[in-house]
Every structure is written in C-alpha cells, then in structure tokens.
Amino acid sequence: MPKIDFHALFDALPSPYMVLDRELRYVEVNQAYVDTLGRYRDTLLGQPIFEMFPDPGESGRLLRASFERVLQTGQPDTMALISYAIERPASEGGGMQMRYWSAVHTPLFGDDGQVAFIVQNTVDVTELQTLKQQASSEVPAPGETSLLQRVLEVQQANLSLLQETGELRDIFRQAPGFMAVLTGPDLTFTLANDAYQQLVGHRPVIGLPVDAALPEVRGQGFVGLLQSVMASREPFIGRAVGVSLQRTADGPPEERFVDFIYQPILGADGQAAGVFVEGSDVTDRVRAEQQQKLLLDELNHRVKNTLATVQSIAAQTLRTSPDPVAFRQAFESRLLALSATHDLLTASSWRSADLRDILLAEFRPHGVERYRLEGPDLALSPARALALGLLFHELATNAAKYGALSSPEGCVRVHWSVESGQGGDRLVIAWTEEKGPKVSAPTRRGFGSRLIERSLQGELGGEATLAYHADGIQCRVVLPLDA
C-alpha cells in the first residue's frame, strides 16, 4: 500500500484551511487559503492572524470569540455566517473587498490534553449574501432565497445558542462548589470548573482519564466508587470524606476533606454515559470540629485535674488548720494562687505559662525592692506551671508570715537555669531568702511538704529540698523538662 503524503493532501484540499497555535499565530495554510487571500504562504506563517487581517469591529470580535471558545471548551465551533473584508490583489485594482464566510473551527490536542492548535475551514458564501441584497430588484433563481434565509436563520440561532451556552459556561466555571464531568468507560474529564481546578492544584485534567489525571487517588477507592456509580446508575453521596491530593508538583500529598455527590449521567438508552461530580471542600470545617473535640477532651481532663487539686488542697489545709477561720483564710489564699496560674495559662490557650510571670503573680504585692528574679524566659507546660504556682505561693506566704518578706530589710532571690544531662533537660530553681528573721525547721510536715511529694515528686518526677538557715529558708527545685 503506498504511503500517503498528508502534507500534500492538506495542500491539495479544495477548500481554504489554516492552522493556528494557542496565541492565534499561523502555523500552516493550504494552497486554497493562499489563493483565496492573495497572499504568499511565507508572509503568513508565524504571524498573528489579527495583525495580518485586523478588524476592530463586530466581525473581528465574533471571530476572536469563536477561537476562544475552542480554546476554553476543547469543542469545535461553527460560524454559519460572518462578514470579513480581505485585500483585493493589485491586478484587480487593490483595496478591500467585503466577503461573507461560513467557518468551522476544530481543536487539535497536545500531549497534555490541552488544545494546542485550531484548524479553520472556510466556505465563501458571498454569492448567497449578494442574492439577498438583489432580491428587491431581481427575481432570484428557485431555491436561492430560501437557502439564504435558512443560512441566516441558522446563524441567528447559533448566536443565541452561543450566548446561552456562554452564560451557562460562566455559571459553571464560577460556581463556588467544585464540579466536573467525567465521560466514557474510562471516566475521562470533559469539564472541570475553577473550584475543581483549585482543589487538584490547577493540573491539566481535560481529556485525561481520572486515574491518569489524578494518579494519587488510585489507591484511595475513588476510581472504584466512580465505576460502581456507572454500573449501578445510582448516585453516591459522601460526607467529610478524606482525600490525599498532590496539590503542588514538588510538594507532599495534602489531606483534604470533601462533601460530594457522584451523579450518573444517563443516556437515551438508560445506560450511564458518565458521572457528574459536584461538592465542596470542607477541610476548614472538619479541622475546626477536630480541634473543638480536642479542646473539649482537654477541658474535661483539666477540669478533673483541677477538681482533684482543689480536693487535695482542701483536705491538706483542713488537716493543718487549727480552726474554721484559719482554714477559710488558707484555703481561699491557695485557691487564688491556683486561679492566678489558671489565668496565665488561659491567656495562652492552655499551651504554656512563663516561669517569670508565675513568680511575679506572687511577688507583686510586696514591691519590686523585696525580690530579685534571675533566669531566662521559659515556657512551662500546664502541669508544671500549676505545680510550681502552688509551690511558689506556699513559699511566698511562709516568707511573708515568718521569713524574709516579714522583715523590713528582707529580700527573696530566685534564680533558675536549664541544665542538660543524659536524661534530658532539667529546670533547676534556687529560692533564697536573705536578711530575714532567724528560722528553724518545723516539727511537723505541713502543706508545702505534702505538695512537693504529690505534685513535684509523684506526678512530674521532680524533687525539692528545703534548708533552714539563720536568715531565711533556701529551697532547691529540680524538675525534668522532657518528661
């Protein structure tokens, strides 16, 4: 069988043909096109069509709009009748001559599934238009008037349909929810609106089967689900379904959550010809709900811990208070200390509290000349902040009643640092009272001793030691930070 020379075949076609790229520049023309326009082929190739044949009027606008529809939809576009002036050859006197054309614009696709070229085939229908203009003074041949009228009616109907189609296309494209149309047994993308493109990272999907356009969804069950909708001809509704999507070329897969419906598209024979996909990205809502649940769970945990702490404070205060009045004063004071630390944690959404702020809550009532705080800024977890807040309250209360803060000359110095070791980082705090009255070790264990045992040692794995010197108490606290 002889080999066909397609280039020669294209050049030999009797009707004018041209090929444009996406920028509407000439890529190829056949001999009939060259003969019709009276131009040389080499003067056209590579040139923008609207620079070679400018028309700022309605005809130029309609022609450009037809090209844009092909580029946007990937579908052929027909112009039943359009007037467009061409330059007359010099042998015929030159100048411009108005001609009437019927044109078909057909897309050619590239490897990426996008429209790469537009092929135009035109038919010169100037004679038919001339018949209409002469109808008032001449009797046309049988059938010529009706043929022209049908051409005009088709043109008007096409314009109306194009306007309606354009409006529907704009509504589809700009819809807030994502939408796509998949057709055929391999579920090829035919349409996808802006919201869908945003969901999948603006990848080229038109003209590609879904498992080729979105390869990361193959193992997530969505292709099988689409196939089951095609087979059953029944819609499927998904609520807050998680999907992992490659939304950037070099980035990691990103988890999104979507509400969606797969609606089968039924043909005249009742069989599914495709699937209409519609839905919305509800990732922000799902993550907000997840965060709310985490916060509620954490709140329940904190409330239980706080109630347990209050119960422990009440029991231990009652054990060491000689009468109801003393119990009330001590109990309220400790609850206020607990509340002050809670306020610090609330300000950071219960993520942490700064060690310096916890100390300042206890020392501020005594004046800046009565204390010295030395150490780096350090954020403590809620558990550590609450334990140290109560401990500092006990030490400050004791200092105000019996120690350095009860003496006009007394002062409390608190120094802290973070030390690294084999077991991880640990916080070391030194509480030192200076120039206070002489103190001696207590004869029985009080609230502070029990607090150290229950909070620092038992729950947090820390330790604290008290030393009673001539001019005040010294307390050394060591608390792991990585536990």
Image: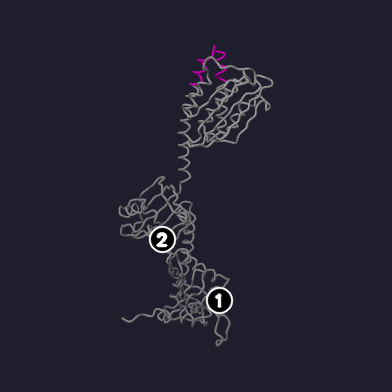
Element at label 2 = strand
Element at label 1 = helix
10 Å crowding of disc 1: few (<14), some (14-19), many (20+): few
What kind of residue is marked 2?
Thr
Relative image position of residue 464 (x, y in whole percent):
53, 26
The residue under the point 38% across, 47% down is 238
Magenta span has 239?
no
Magenta span has 328?
yes
* For residue 264, side relative to residue 21 (left or right): left
Work out which quarter of the rendered image holds the N terminus and state it.
bottom left
Q: Which residue ends up furthest to the top in the rendered image?
A: 323
Q: Is residue 479 above or below residue 441?
A: below
Q: Which numbered tag is attached to residue 52?
A: 1
The residue under the point 51% across, 71% down is 24
Q: Is residue 47 above or below residue 329?
A: below
Considering the whole magenta stretch, tell me its main secondary structure. Answer: helix
Nearer-the-camera pick, 354 or 287: 354
Q: Is residue 217 above or below residue 120?
A: above
Relative image position of residue 463 (x, y in whole percent):
51, 27
What kind of residue is marked 1?
Met
Relative image position of residue 416 (x, y in whole percent):
58, 32
10 Å crowding of disc 2: few (<14), some (14-19), many (20+): some
Q: Which region of the structure is painted magenta? A: 312-332
Q: Which residue ends up furthest to the bottom in the rendered image?
A: 91
Write down the residue under mark 2.
190
